[in-house]
Every structure is written in structure tokens, then in C-alpha cells.
Image (tube, rainbow, N blue to C red):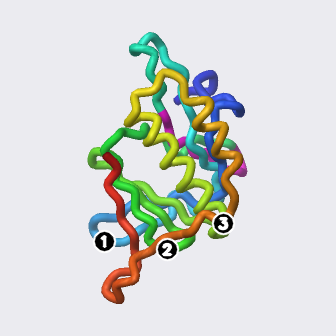
Amino acid sequence: MNEEARPDDDSYVVRVTAVVMTRDESSGGWLALDGCLSRVGVCRLRPDGLQGRNSFLIHGERLQDRQVILQCFLKKDLVYTKATPTFHHWQVDNKKCGLTFQCSSDARAFDRGVRRALEDLAEGSTTSSSTLQNEAELGDDDVFTTATDSSSNSSQRREP
């Protein structure tokens, strides 16, 4: 994404501060990408004649220099996992990305933003402004869900 293609500030469904993580398949673990805090958000991209449908992008820029370090277009079949209250990860196609949030309220807000975007994609809506504007009305009392099975501390959901 080049400089002029950066999402507008008003196109974001949600923006939080987090460390962008990448999956290291050789070790089976997650590594911090650049090790710096980034401003990460879910943004709605305006349709360019693609049947008037919105598309959504998870966009991340390092705080220190605004270098783009994360670009991930959302698809309906996104697999999103809330591994802990402050670490979430997802997979689109073969790309695995994650975020370590500074606080659980940022994680909840980001999760809600992703869910809203996926709902919009699933509905094939041409205008999602009312759905996405209602996001601001949701409070922090949205319950964070995790599996209660002692063999797993993550909650995984495959979106329709």
C-alpha cells in the first residue's frame, strides 16, 4: 500500500495500539514483527465499482515512523481466535497474523470491529454505515468469551 492509498481516518471501524505478531512455523510460536507498538485498525474500503460492496482491511502502522507493517484483507471465511484476553490471531488463506494488545478493552474493541466487518461481508451489504456506527454504542461490558475446558484456553470461531 503506498502513501496515497492509506485509509482515511474516518474509514476505520476500530483502531487500537498493539504489537503485530507473525507465526513462525519452524518453532510453532508467535514472533513480534519489528517488536514495536503499532496503530492497528479495521478499515472499510470504498467500493470501486465492484458491485457496490464494501471490503475491509486490517491495517497496521508502526507508531514511531508510520511504516505499514500489516495489511490483511478480510474474507468471509476468516478464522479468528481469541487465544487470551490480550492476544488474538487470525488466518486468511495461508497468512497467519496476530496482535498482542496493551489491554483487554482494546482486544474486545478490536474483536467487535472484526465481527462487525465480517457481518457486513456476509450480508453483502452495499452500505454498512448504520451497522458500523452502532459499534460506538457498544460498551466495555461485552463479555470476553473463552473456552472453559481445562485442555484449551482459547476460543475459536469460524465465521460463516
Local packing at callout 3 (Cα closer than 10 Å; few below 14, some 14-19, many 20+) is few
Which residues are drawn in magenta?
56-65
Mark found first going from the N terminus, 1 or 3? 1
Write down the residue under mark 3.
Answer: 141
The mark lying in front, picked from 2 and 1, is 2
Q: Say if 2 sits above or below 62 in the image.
A: above
Closer to the camera, 114 or 86? Answer: 114
Q: Is residue 62 magenta?
A: yes
Give me the disc on residue 28: 1
Type of amino acid at the residue the image marks with label 3: Asp
Q: CA distance from mark 1 to mark 3?
A: 34 Å
Mark found first going from the N terminus, 2 or 3? 2
Q: CA distance from mark 2 to mark 1?
A: 17 Å
Q: Secondary structure at mark 3?
A: loop
Q: Secondary structure at mark 2?
A: strand
Closer to the camera, 34 or 75? Answer: 75
Q: Secondary structure at mark 1?
A: loop
Which residue occupies 71% across, 33% down? Answer: 9
